[in-house]
Amino acid sequence: MRSNQLNSFISDLIDIGLVFSNKPISEQRSGRITMVSVGQSGKPTKNDYDITDVVEDNLPEETSIREYTRLFENGFYSLLFHDGSLAQLSYSISNRNGDIIAYRYVYIPAVAEIDVSASESPDIHLNNADLSKLPRHPVLRFEFDPDGQARRHPESHLHLSSNSTRIPVNAKMTPRCFIGLIIDYYYEGFIEAFHAKYPQMAVAAGHLSQDDEKRFHIAPYRI
């Protein structure tokens, strides 16, 4: 997906009311590939954190409430959903044919009902809240990393609230496919409007090893 296609797609998400705002799209060309990212959406490093957030060189858990508020307050996301949830989008494409050759897509659910149109901060809801009673959906991180493929580390996989949990995904996913999955399972009220613009197609071609094919895995539709 080229930058102009991605920009048009994000505009459609804003038009249907799913996304409230987005960060700028950037491209970085390097040899035969182009890296595309929306805002600050790559894997965080120690330099991205305030020193008080780093304990013994360990970064905060990406599923934690503290990490969500840090991302929200500092604008470390690609898309801000209408309910305060966040998405991060970054991927690399081949300059020869435009195929996606690596990606990192992350969905970070809001930790409270946040009115983003009123510029609310998560702190408004968290300062006096009983944190033990706040519902928390899992963080979903889809990655495609052919160079990192190994036993129990499929090139295409889903991290489900844990770095060590890698569920094989039997296809490369486009940003459209990723957002379509999020809508289907978390935003039922937007399914009709989204698929009117982006209908589902056949299951995409497989990208799993024979061993991973035998394991439980996800087979996403193409969108």
Image: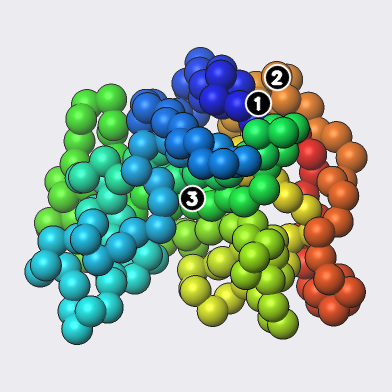
- Name the residue located 40 percent from the left edge and 46 percent from the top edge: 41
Q: Determine whether, in the image, residue 182 is placed left or right of residue 163.
A: right
In terms of sequence position, does the residue under pointer 3 or pointer 1 come before the other?
3
Relative depth, front residue between 85 and 6: 6
**Residue 50 appears left or right of 106:** left
Question: Which residue is tagged 2?
Answer: 197
| Disc ID at residue 19 | none
Q: Which residue is mark 3?
A: 107
Q: Quadrant of residue 152?
A: bottom right
Instruction: Tell me: 153 left or right of 22.
Output: right
Query: SS of the residue at dot 1?
Result: helix
Q: Are marks 2 and 1 in contact (CB under 8 Å)?
A: yes
Along the line of sight, which residue is nearer the eye, 129 or 206? 206
Labels 3 and 2: the sequence-earlier one: 3
In this figure, which residue is indicated by the disc labeled 1?
194
Q: Secondary structure at mark 3?
A: strand
Is residue 49 shown above or below 120? Answer: below
Q: Is residue 71 visible?
A: yes
